[in-house]
Image (tube, rainbow, N blue to C red):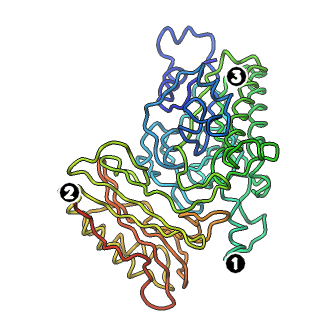
């Protein structure tokens, strides 16, 4: 069995090895290797025993640790700062911004993987592979971007535009008295064969969330078994839920770790990896299968481990070239003169999260940034002035875009989103409204939003944001009183 752990650079090797076997040596290979790709969710580098976590942190990960011992480890690579961008890059082999997916996809939004993008699954299918994906796609809900239309013969999992906490929509809505719908109108577990429309299987509830990974494992083992019997090489992509919040382990793993539900969930993810490896051995394809284990984007910093909620967190402070992407964490590299640092702060009160972002420059800002800052702030002021009861989300965004476009700035992603009471923990993003073109949600009094019309270029970025409340009449109530500017320190 060939094993690659914690890597994305391996994907290029897979393309060359199985999709383009043009060399004489490749042509002489008797068969193409199977590929099992297990993608964990929000697992941090230091969570696993192989990298100093595991038993030492109260949640043993013996199967993944053994995998690491047997593996080629790829530990130096670029991983993007969220579910959607990292998965877009993984599937296409390109920076996510090339696909317009550099920010996390929100259910109901038009942002989706473009039809023109070519995925890993499409390449492998053309090379003769049977392909299946069971789990989380999170690359948009538009039909052309759904997995069964992007190279996969079989798909089963949560809706393609959703993430693992989507089931909270109904209990959160009922808790806040903002939404009360029956289960069959909420998020559903869905499935589809190649080229077919999605079909709802059952409501996605808390109970289903706890056991979903074992459903994915069962389907994965069945898929591998069928392809072995058919004598066809397979590509199985298994993006599991562990350890995405809220960390609700299945009943058999509840209380298994010493560090609460996060640890229980981590141990469950380890068991899932072990079960898939055991299945390969039972099928007799252990030595004919490339296994890749990776995590999508590292740990979710704002999530407490007991129940997956978040609390006031340390600021996110990317500096230098790392400011070219939103929501990156701090770095241990020294600050340098002339470079910027994006500071993203948040606080929580009564489960409402209020976020704030500003940029600090040591020395003089680069001329391009210096020219762009007043445009961004002018556009933000126009959007805030437009954010009044009775207008729509797209109206607010249009005010920003009018200023930006007049000054040569084009920004296709949203400029803000609603915030609110998270369940069971608060979240920056409530997912009920988005300040972007096409969103016709009408603003009502007491709706709260985080507006962040940041600009992220190739090697620098600039952020300014405000959290605000829609008032009964008049301008919105902005929660901070920090000047909207770049802060220059000599």
The residue indicated by pointer 2 is 365
- Quadrant hosting residue 400: bottom left
Secondary structure, mark 3, is loop
Pick the quarter of the image with the C terminus. Answer: bottom left
The residue indicated by pointer 3 is 232
Neighbour tally class for label 1: few under 14, some 14-19, many 20 plus, Cα within 10 Å = few
Spatial CA distance of label 3 from label 1 is: 52 Å
Identify the mark nearer the N-term, 3 or 2: 3
Q: Give the x, y percent position of residue 41.
A: 60, 44
Image position of 211 (left or right of 466):
right
Q: Which mark is residue 193?
A: none
Identify the mark nearer the N-term, 3 or 1: 1
- Quadrant hosting residue 258: top right
Spatial CA distance of label 2 from label 1 is: 47 Å
Secondary structure, mark 1, is loop
Identify the mark nearer the N-term, 2 or 1: 1
Q: Are marks 3 and 2 in contact (CB under 8 Å)?
A: no
Image position of 187 (left or right of 409):
right
């Amino acid at each position: 069995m060939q094993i690659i752990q914690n890597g994305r650079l391996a994907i290029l090797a897979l393309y060359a090895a199985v999709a383009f076997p043009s060399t004489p040596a490749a042509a002489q290979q008797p068969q193409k290797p199977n590929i099992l790709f297990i993608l964990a969710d929000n697992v941090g580098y230091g969570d696993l025993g192989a990298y100093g976590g595991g038993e030492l942190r109260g949640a043993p990960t013996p199967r993944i640790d053994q995998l690491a011992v047997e593996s080629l480890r790829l530990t130096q690579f670029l991983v993007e700062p969220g579910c959607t961008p990292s998965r877009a890059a993984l599937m296409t082999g390109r920076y996510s911004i090339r696909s317009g997916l550099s920010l996390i996809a929100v259910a109901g939004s038009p942002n989706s993987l473009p039809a023109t993008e070519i995925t890993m699954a499409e390449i492998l299918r053309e090379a003769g592979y049977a392909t299946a994906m069971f789990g989380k796609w999170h690359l948009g809900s538009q039909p052309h971007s759904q997995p069964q239309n992007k190279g996969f013969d079989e798909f089963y999992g949560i809706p393609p535009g959703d993430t693992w906490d989507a089931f909270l929509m109904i209990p959160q809505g009922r808790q806040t008295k903002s939404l009360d719908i029956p289960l069959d109108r909420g998020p559903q577990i869905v499935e589809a064969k190649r080229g077919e429309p999605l079909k709802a299987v059952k409501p996605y509830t808390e109970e289903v969330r706890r056991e979903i990974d074992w459903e994915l494992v069962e389907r994965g083992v069945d898929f591998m078994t069928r392809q072995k019997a058919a004598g066809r090489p397979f590509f199985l992509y298994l993006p599991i839920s562990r350890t995405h919040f809220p960390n609700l382990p299945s009943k058999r793993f509840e209380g298994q770790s010493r560090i609460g539900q996060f640890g229980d969930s981590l141990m469950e993810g380890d068991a899932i990896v072990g079960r898939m490896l055991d299945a390969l051995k039972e099928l007799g394809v252990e030595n004919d299968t490339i296994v890749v284990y990776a995590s999508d984007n590292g740990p979710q910093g704002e999530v407490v481990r007991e129940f997956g909620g978040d609390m006031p967190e340390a600021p996110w402070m990317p500096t230098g070239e790392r400011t070219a992407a939103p929501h990156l964490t701090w770095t241990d590299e020294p600050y340098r003169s002339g470079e910027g640092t994006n500071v993203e702060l948040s606080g929580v009160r009564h489960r409402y999260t209020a976020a704030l972002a500003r940029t600090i420059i040591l020395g003089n800002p680069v001329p391009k940034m210096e020219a762009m800052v007043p445009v961004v702030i002018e556009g933000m002021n126009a959007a805030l002035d437009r954010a009044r009861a009775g207008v729509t989300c797209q109206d607010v965004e249009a005010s920003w875009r009018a200023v930006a476009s007049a000054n040569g700035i084009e920004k296709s992603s949203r400029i803000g989103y609603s915030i609110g009471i998270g369940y069971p923990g608060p979240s920056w993003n409530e997912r009920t409204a988005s300040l972007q073109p096409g969103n016709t949600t009408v603003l009502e009094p007491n709706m709260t939003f985080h507006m962040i019309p940041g600009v992220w270029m190739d090697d620098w970025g600039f952020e300014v944001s405000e959290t605000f409340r829609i008032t009964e009449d008049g301008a919105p109530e902005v929660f901070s009183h920090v000047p909207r500017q770049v802060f220059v320190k000599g």
